[in-house]
Image: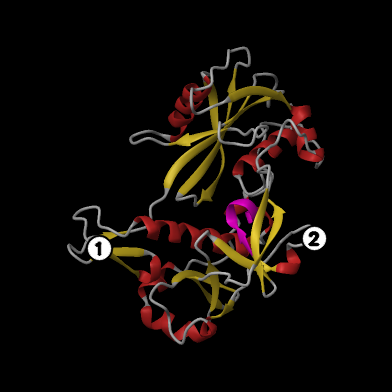
Amino acid sequence: MSSVRRSGPFRLTMPPALSRSTADRQEALRTDPERLRAAWPSARVIRVDGHGRAPVPEDRVVGVVPKDVPLVSVPALDIASEVPTEAVFLGRWSDADFWAVSAEPGPDARMVALDAGGWGRAAEVPVVAGEAWVELRLHGDVLDDTAAGLLTTALALRNWHRRARYCARCGGVTRLHQFGWASRCEQCGREEYPRTDPAVICLVHDDVGVNGEHVLLARQPTWPPTRYSVLAGFVEAGESLERCVEREIREEVGVDVRDVRYLGSQPWPFPRSVMVGFAARADSGTPLTPADGEIEDARWVSRDRVRAALTHGDPDLQLPGGTSIAHVMIRAWAEAGD
């Protein structure tokens, strides 16, 4: 745990894990097929399987503490002699075009258990030919900045493609164009572009001092028994982000919040969200009334206990893994002064 800060409202002290992209998206190249095809022989390709996993070097994650792990990219000509129809252009990095294609680890892969990033269980990943195929949601925080950005983009586009196979206007079959960044209906010609659904996530603390002494944490019924996080929900049509924060907290635990302020954001391609992080204040004396079927338990937790859980672990208080913006928000609040 870093040294405690004691001045002003807390802010995020590090970028969220999936907001660390370094690649240049090069939007103009998506409509320049001649340029992209000409550069294919010198391009690099990352492979993504049907579960959203991509390969990293086995010796960077198995039997060691993983940190700043790169993706395994392969020369484009190892994939095909020319750009495959389903290939998705991700952008440029280190003087090379980067693409994503669908691929599988293969039948010779063995399953190896890796820590699942705070989700309360081990995750088995396929390992074959010196490559471990890891999942972004569970292991995104151990990837290096470039890997995190590339895989986040690849997964976001893949998930959109799976949900954009038919035209929303006429029901006709769609085909991808702009190298994965648009779809066009073969029947009526309607074009569609990747969707992102906004969601808010809010760290609510009590009214003591500037940053409070307790944070409001809750758990969903489907989570591991001791896992808690801050509250979140989707933005409704015609709703501002700030009003969504107020509504979601009230609906989920029966608490009115105030002084809503922005902290940061993170793409969350599960399947196609962007998480917009906020902080707010509330009266800790208000009775908590968890929404039936949505929230199994909610409680106020002290800063000292949160600090201890982040530093040493707490079997009765399991906090979000490092891939989630919730982890960065909780850590920033815990490290702040009151």
Q: Which residue is mark 2?
A: 64
Is residue 33 rendered to the left or right of residue 151?
left
Quadrant of res 310: top right
Range of residues picked out in magenta: 133-140
Tag shown at residue 173: 1
Q: Is residue 160 magenta?
A: no
Vertical placement of residue 115 versus 86, above or below: above
Q: Position of residue 87 (x, y in %)?
A: 44, 73
Towards the viewer: 35 or 234? 234
Q: Position of residue 72 (x, y in %)?
A: 63, 72
Q: Position of residue 236 (x, y in %)?
A: 37, 35
What residue do we see at 78% from left, 38% from top? 313
Q: Is residue 137 magenta?
A: yes
Would residue 45 be visible to someone looking at this image? yes
Is residue 73 rendered to the left or right of residue 318?
left
Quadrant of res 314: top right
Vertical placement of residue 141 versus 130, above or below: above
Tag shown at residue 325: none
